[in-house]
């Protein structure tokens, strides 16, 4: 039983990271009906931003002195990395997606794949293809209870992710920009006629989704120890599956989907084989597309023509 609870804790931790990334996919799709395949690379860039910011702030010096990195500096790393990725997301939208916004749907999709490949190769040139050990922004502490080992890093991942998800929910529900996002998700043309600044709202959507992906990148680095320029490919695809599972375009659905994918992976690795942990994600995708293509929390919308 203790092994089961251990897998649940690990699954919720990993699922929280997937949920943060999935939110970016679902927010952009909800407004533009665009699958932003470059989002995984924004997640990767966020992880590297955190890596270099922590190094710049002297994490190695604290480690060499046997001291933990101050919590305040760790929060500075998180906030600045989120800001850097938000800027990257805004640039991607302005330079790559906005010029093809009114083009046939296949054009933005191909553009997204092109941006993804560009960022992957740019990262390999800038950072080298070699994996890097993530700096110890949080010093690991272990707690044992009933045979279950819980680390402060796992708890921090879950708490930070939960706080960001709640913050996003409050932002979307209670701010003017959030209401504008919901209006655009229903009908962009009608929202424009009502005086909403469509470009500004879409910029805000990309900025927020990219910032959440950066937070996911830093948490992923702390959890998985190493990062590399191609880390966003598979992780981004899994987060996309999480968005589809929950109902792409549905914010609570992205959270539920992320947590379920994380749990499915960990339980599969623990009770079947680690070799199947990636396969189970895409098996879930096939099953959900066959049985409930709108996702667990998605709804079927009838369009009038």
Image (spheres, helix red, strand yellow):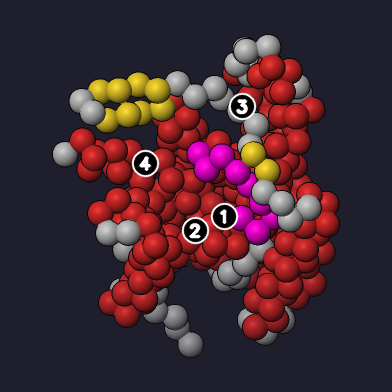
Residue occupied by mark 2: 239
Which numbered circle lies on residue 10? 4
Q: Marks 3 and 2, Cα distance to the nearest angstrom? A: 24 Å
216 relative position to 119: left or right: left
Give the farthest residue toward the bottom: 305
Q: Earlier in the sequence, mark 3 or mark 2?
A: 3
Note whether 52 is above or below 197 in the view shown. Answer: above
Describe the element under mark 1 as helix, strand or loop: helix
> Is the residue marked by circle 4 packed among few (<14), some (14-19), or many (20+) residues within 10 Å?
many
Q: Is residue 56 magenta?
A: no
* Labels 3, 2: front one: 3
Quadrant in which residue 155 is drawn: top left
Residue for point 73% across, 18% down? 61
Residue occupied by mark 1: 24
Q: Nearer the viewer, residue 105 or 263?
A: 263
Q: Marks 1 and 3, Cα distance to the nearest angstrom? A: 24 Å
238 relative position to 128: left or right: left
Q: Nearer the viewer, residue 72 or 283?
A: 283
Q: Position of residue 256 (x, y in %)?
A: 36, 52
The magenta stretch is: 223-231
133 relative position to 164: left or right: right
Q: Marks 1 and 4, Cα distance to the nearest angstrom? A: 23 Å
Residue for point 44% across, 25% down? 152
Q: Earlier in the sequence, mark 1 or mark 4?
A: 4
* Labels 4, 2: front one: 4
Residue occupied by mark 3: 137
Residue for point 36% across, 76% down? 286
Tag 2 and tag 1, C-beta contact below 8 Å: yes
Q: Earlier in the sequence, mark 2 or mark 1?
A: 1
Q: Nearer the viewer, residue 279 or 70?
A: 279
Note whether 104 is above or below 177 in the view shown. Answer: below
Tag 1 and tag 4, C-beta contact below 8 Å: no
């Amino acid at each position: 039983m203790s092994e089961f609870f251990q897998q649940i804790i690990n699954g919720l931790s990993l699922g929280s990271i997937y949920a943060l990334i999935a939110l970016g996919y679902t927010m952009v799709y909800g407004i533009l009906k665009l699958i932003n395949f470059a989002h995984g690379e924004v997640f990767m860039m966020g992880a590297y931003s955190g890596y270099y910011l922590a190094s710049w702030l002297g994490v190695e010096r604290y480690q060499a002195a046997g001291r933990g990195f101050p919590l305040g500096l760790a929060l500075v790393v998180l906030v600045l990395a989120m800001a850097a990725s938000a800027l990257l997301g805004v640039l991607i939208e302005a330079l790559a997606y906005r010029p093809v916004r009114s083009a046939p749907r296949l054009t933005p999709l191909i553009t997204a794949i092109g941006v993804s490949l560009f960022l992957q190769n740019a990262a390999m040139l800038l950072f080298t293809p070699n994996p890097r050990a993530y700096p110890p922004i949080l010093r690991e502490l272990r707690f044992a209870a009933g045979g279950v080992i819980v680390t402060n890093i796992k708890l921090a991942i879950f708490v930070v992710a939960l706080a960001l998800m709640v913050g996003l929910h409050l932002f979307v529900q209670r701010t003017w920009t959030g209401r504008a996002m919901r209006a655009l998700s229903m009908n962009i043309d009608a929202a424009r006629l009502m005086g909403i600044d469509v470009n500004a709202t879409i910029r805000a959507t990309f900025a927020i989704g990219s910032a959440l992906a950066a937070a996911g990148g830093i948490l992923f680095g702390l959890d998985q120890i190493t990062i590399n320029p191609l880390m966003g490919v598979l992780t981004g695809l899994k987060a996309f599956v999480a968005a589809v599972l929950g109902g792409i375009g549905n914010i609570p659905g992205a959270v539920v989907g992320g947590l379920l994918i994380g749990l499915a992976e960990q339980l599969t690795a623990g009770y079947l084989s680690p070799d199947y942990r990636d396969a189970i994600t895409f098996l879930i995708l096939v099953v959900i597309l066959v049985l409930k293509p709108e996702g667990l929390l998605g709804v079927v919308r009838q369009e009038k023509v």
